[in-house]
Image: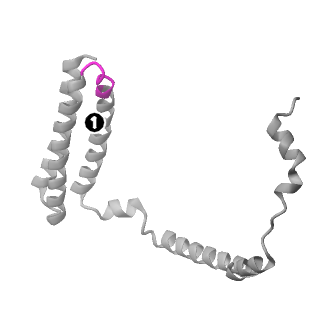
Amino acid sequence: MKKDRLEEFVSANRDEFDFREPSPELWEKIAKNTPQKKVVPLRSYFMRVAAVLVVALISSVLVWQSGILSSNKLARNADPELVELMETETYYSHQVNKKLKEIQKCYYTYPELKDEIETDLNELEDMYKVLKDDLGENISNKSVIEAMIENNRYRLKLCDDVLEQINC
């Protein structure tokens, strides 16, 4: 391979480039201002890790034995109407999401559809949040629970109607 002129020049004059070095006083100042690394013994590090693991293990065993996170325990103690609401909310949100994915496939054909459907669904979602807040204030109010379920039905019906109209 042929060397270019710059490479030849650098090779020939390398000693002339390296004639300047910092003074020893400068190196001493740099060493003085450089913070020394704190050396943590490996044994101390392992002791800290072991302590964290012991605390985490004991905490998880206590939580598991107490059954705090058991969904069956929560469901047994919960109001049957709230359990029904949670189940219907899960069902309807799954259905709406599935239908919305089908609608989204048609956005390229009907670009105006995106704004309309999302605006309507956002309005229904906002109304649902208000109902949820009302439910938090008065947990045994059947009319609020029924209104929440009805809101979910409206969202699903809206998606069904859109899918029926666009036939995409």
Q: Position of residue 132 (x, y in %)?
A: 19, 56
The residue lying toward the viewer, choosing from 131 and 19, is 19
Q: Position of residue 71 (x, y in %)?
A: 39, 59
In the image, residue 67 above or below residue 15:
below
Residue at horizontal 29%, vertical 41%? 93
Q: Position of residue 113 (x, y in %)?
A: 21, 26
Tell me where residue 69 sits by quadrant. bottom left
Q: Which SS class for mark 1?
A: helix
In the image, residue 163 above or below residue 18:
above
In the image, residue 108 above or below residue 88:
above
Residue at horizontal 86%, vertical 40%? 8
Q: Is residue 109 magenta?
A: yes
Q: Is residue 83 magenta?
A: no
Q: Quadrant of the N terminus?
A: top right
* Callout 1 crowding tier (Cα within 10 Å): few <14, some 14–19, many ≥20: many
Residue at horizontal 31%, vertical 28%? 104
Extreme-top residue of the structure: 167
* Mark 1 lies on residue: 96
Tell me where residue 52 sits by quadrant. bottom right
Residue at horizontal 87%, vertical 49%? 13
Extreme-left residue of the structure: 143
Total numbered circles: 1
The residue lying toward the viewer, choosing from 88 and 120, is 120
The residue lying toward the viewer, choosing from 30 and 21, is 21
The residue lying toward the viewer, choosing from 81 and 7, is 7
Q: Position of residue 20 (x, y in %)?
A: 81, 65
Magenta region's main secondary structure? loop
Magenta residues? 103-110
Q: Quadrant of the C terminus?
A: top left
Task: Give the residue type that dot 1 points to.
Answer: Val
Q: Viewed as shown, does residue 75 lie left or right of 8?
A: left
Coloring applied to the structure = one colour
